[in-house]
Structure formats: structure tokens, C-alpha cells
Amino acid sequence: MATTPARHDPDVLVIGAGVVGLFCAWFLRQAGHTVTVVDRHEVGDPAACSAGNTGFVGTQGSAPLAEPGVAAKGLRWLLDPESPFHVRPRRDAGLLAWLWHFRRHCTERHARAGFEVLLALKQRSLAILREVCADGDLADTLTARGMVLACRTEQGYAQARRGIPAAVERGVPLRELDRAELARLEPGVDFAIAGALLNEEGAALRIPAFLLGFARLLRERGVEIVTGTEVRDFEVTGRRVRAVRTSRGDLHPTEVVIAAGVWSAACARTLGVGLTLQPAKGYTVTVPAGPGTPRLPMLLSEGKVAVMPLGDRIRVGGTLELSGLDNSVSPRRVDGILRTVRSYLPGLDTDRRLHVWSGLRPCTPDSLPLIGRAGTYRNVSVATGHGHIGMGLAPAGGRLLAQLLDGKDPDLPLETFALDRFGRGRR
Ligand SMILES: Cc1cc2nc3c(=O)[nH]c(=O)nc-3n(C[C@H](O)[C@H](O)[C@H](O)COP(=O)(O)OP(=O)(O)OC[C@H]3O[C@@H](n4cnc5c(N)ncnc54)[C@H](O)[C@@H]3O)c2cc1C
């Protein structure tokens, strides 16, 4: 049910009530602004990417998607409809430009630099989440008991082990897990793997419980969240947005933040601002938990599938498909995810599917978010592009956005996240 529209014009209007928009609102409110968040759907509506994902938020998985070797695998993956990464071939200049930038970032140097930034964001985000989820309704939406990285092949295991020193050097408590310890941590789980690592700082959010609880907390703190309200256009005078036209009337905020996930590109385009952003579809499947179900969140390394225990259920998620703004479910890809899961965890019963969900990740070619002023507009900013790890980046990203608007010293250099770092982007 749609909530009532804003009763007053806020200092800041945030477009999008996904995890990114909500964390922008959190830090803007903390800085003393009046904040309204608008969304065309309810908070937690399955159309939002934040609503059905696996919720991993620890320091694991801080690598950018563009890595050495990914471009070479690309052609093989392109032809395999069950591969973890897929590009649906189509004539789309925006997609080609994105792929060109992605290919350029598949180098050791870029991957290392990207890892440093993503890890710094994830470490800050985890600290913020620990505070936000310290008590109250949100207390049981964050689990921080560690995460297992399971490797099916000797080659994958050797590669994962090679990453330990670099991770440890940067403060990530990653280590090898021997068979006996794995059996102690996961009693009764049947593994078909070559080996595993443990990230003791591994953490995960229960989704959508976290999102719904966080929205409640924001309302308690005075943030107005207006749902069932679509932003359709802007009234512009000179270099300022004077009014935001919504399906339920005009709003006149002092500042506008576009945090509309994959739809941010269309929103910014209305203002003539191009974003280098592509939707990357993924799926989660929720099945009942059984006796052979893992207790800790687990990443199935080579298959790029996440496994998230949720009490009496277990959610598995994966695939990254550059298929445009289309969130239809491909049964073949869903079967592929479940086959991957069974190849690591043969004892897990995946026959009864309680829920299948697809979501569109807002992805940039270098996997870093877009956080910055929109073009030459004096009162419009963008916060999007948090990609495959948006739950784990949104808290620190929200604080950066608030620092940008208030002209405060940012936690990390804002140039790193500038909207025009790939050129001006396609309009
Ligand atoms: C299968 C899968 C698994 C994932 N697992 C993880 C994980 O384990 N860990 C992790 O960190 N990340 C994960 N992610 C990524 C994460 O879900 C996203 O990065 C994150 O949810 C993006 O949040 P967002 O707020 O930018 O976008 P969204 O959640 O999509 O929110 C955007 C909102 O904007 C609203 N909106 C759009 N246009 C308008 C408009 N014109 N007017 C009003 N409202 C508008 C939409 O309705 C929507 O609610 C996963 C993603 C997928 C698909």
C-alpha cells in the first residue's frame, strides 16, 4: 500500500528506497538534514535488487569483477548458458562501451587497485552495520560468525590459498581450514571439495528482514519514506533542479540524490547526464534446510555461487547476466545454480524450491560505485553502481554521499567514484 506523499519540501530528496538510498538517507539525517526517500514500490518489493539477495556483507568477496583472465574466459562463457557470467549478445552502444571499459580493467594493476578500494569500503561498511544492528529489531538480521570459501578443484584451492597473504596484510582474517576443523564447524555436511578457507570476519544480512527493519528505524529517526510514488521528470532552471515531478505531485527539495539502482541511468538521462552502468541479472533460490545444510554462509569459489543459511531455509544465489533491463527468470540458469550447489554439497536437497527470485545489479565496468555530482548540476548527485556487492558497500557509500553534500572531508578520495571516470557516458 502506498504511503502518503511528503507533507513538506525536504532539504534532500533521495530517489530509491533500496539499500543504497536508505543508507544515503541515514547519514544525511544524522548530519541534521530533513530527508524524504521516494520509491515507486514498497520497501522490500521484489523488483528492487536489495530485496532478495544473499546478503553477504563481510570483507570476503572484495574483488572487482574485471580480473586478469576473465576476458579470456569471456568467449567460452558467452557460449555457455549455464556459465556464472553471461552477456546476451545484442546491438546496444551502451553495452559495447561498458564491455570495452570492462576489458580495459582486466589487468593485474586495475584488479589490485580495485580490491584495495572495495576492501576499504567493505571494512567501513561492516563497522557501520555492526553499530546499526547492535540492538533492537535489527539485532538478529546481521550474522557475523565467519564465512567459508569452498573450492571444488585443486587448482581453485591453490589459487584461493595464494590470495591469503595479500588479504591478511590488509587486515582480513582469512586462513586455511583443515578437514577436521571444517567437520567441527559444519557437522553432518557432506562436502565434495578439494579444500576450504575461513574468513573469520565473514558476515551476512538476513534479507529482506534487514531492509524492512532499517526502513522502520529510519522512519523513527524522522526520515520520510514515501512509497508508491514514481519520479517521472524534473523541472530545471539553469544548473539547478527546481522541482521533481512524481506520479503524485511535485516536490521542491534543495538537493536531489539519484539512488535508483539500475534505473538510475534512465533517471539521470532525463537530466542529460550519462552513466556508464549496466544491469547484471542474478538469481536466488530458496529451499528448505535439511540435515546436511551448512550453518555458516559459504561461497562456492569456482562456481561463484553464494549459500546463505536462513534458519529453516537456505538461499543460494549466483550468475551475472548482462541482459539489459529484463528480470525474467531463465529456468536453465536456475538449474545451473542448483547443479553447482550439488557439485559442492551433494547431500543438500534442492528439489523443493520455495522461492525463485531475480534481481538486477547496477554494475560499473570497474565494480566501484558511482558517487558524485551529476554533470554540472549544482543540486543533483548520484549514488549507484554498487554492483555485485552493494549490500556490503552501501553503508560506507552512503556516508561518502553525505560527506560530499556537506562539503566534509571524505573517508576516501571522491575522484575514485566520479561519474565521468569512463568519459561522459552514453546519454
Ligand atoms: C542474485 C543476487 C545476489 C546478490 N548478493 C549480494 C550479496 O550477497 N552481497 C552484496 O553485497 N550484494 C549482493 N547483491 C547485490 C545487491 O543486491 C545490489 O548491489 C544492491 O541491492 C543495489 O541496491 P540499490 O539500492 O542500488 O538498488 P535497488 O535495490 O534496486 O533499489 C533501487 C530502488 O529505486 C526505485 N526506483 C527506480 N526508479 C525509480 C523512480 N523513477 N521513481 C521512484 N523509485 C524508483 C526502485 O523501485 C528500487 O526500489 C546481489 C544481487 C543479486 C542480483
Image (spheres, rainbow, N blue to C red):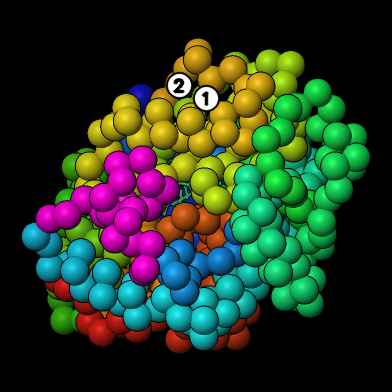
Task: Check contact, mark 1 vs mark 2: CB within 8 A.
Answer: yes
Q: Is residue 242 magenta?
A: no
Crowding at mark 1 (Cα within 10 Å: few <14, some 14-19, many 20+)? many
Q: Tell me the residue at 47%/55% (across/down).
A: 388
Q: In which quarter of the image is the N terminus?
A: top left
39, 340: nearer the viewer: 340
The x and y percentages for residue 88 are 21, 51
48, 58: nearer the viewer: 58
Q: Tell me the residue at 31%/46% (across/down).
A: 80
Q: Tell me the residue at 20%/58% (across/down).
A: 266
The x and y percentages for residue 46 are 39, 32
Q: In this view, does 329 lie to the left or right of 353?
A: left
Q: Give the range drawn in magenta.
A: 71-90
The x and y percentages for residue 310 are 65, 27
Q: Which residue lies furthest to the front in this view?
A: 154
- The quarter of the displayed image where residue 7 is located: top left
Identify the amino acid type marked 2: His
Q: Tell me the residue at 69%/62% (across/down).
A: 158
Distance from disc 1 to disc 2, alpha carbons, whole Å, reads 5 Å
State whether label 1 is within 8 Å of ligand 1: no
- Tag 2, which secondary structure? strand
Q: In this view, does 128 lie to the left or right of 187?
A: left
Location of mark 2 (residue):
355
Identify the amino acid type marked 1: Thr
- Tag 1, which secondary structure? strand
Mark found first going from the N terminus, 1 or 2: 1
**Vertical arrangement, residue 423 with respect to residue 122, above or below:** below
264, 187: nearer the viewer: 187
Crowding at mark 2 (Cα within 10 Å: few <14, some 14-19, many 20+)? few
Location of mark 1 (residue):
286
**Vertical arrangement, residue 127 with respect to residue 300, above or below:** below
Q: Is residue 31 left or right of residue 107?
A: right
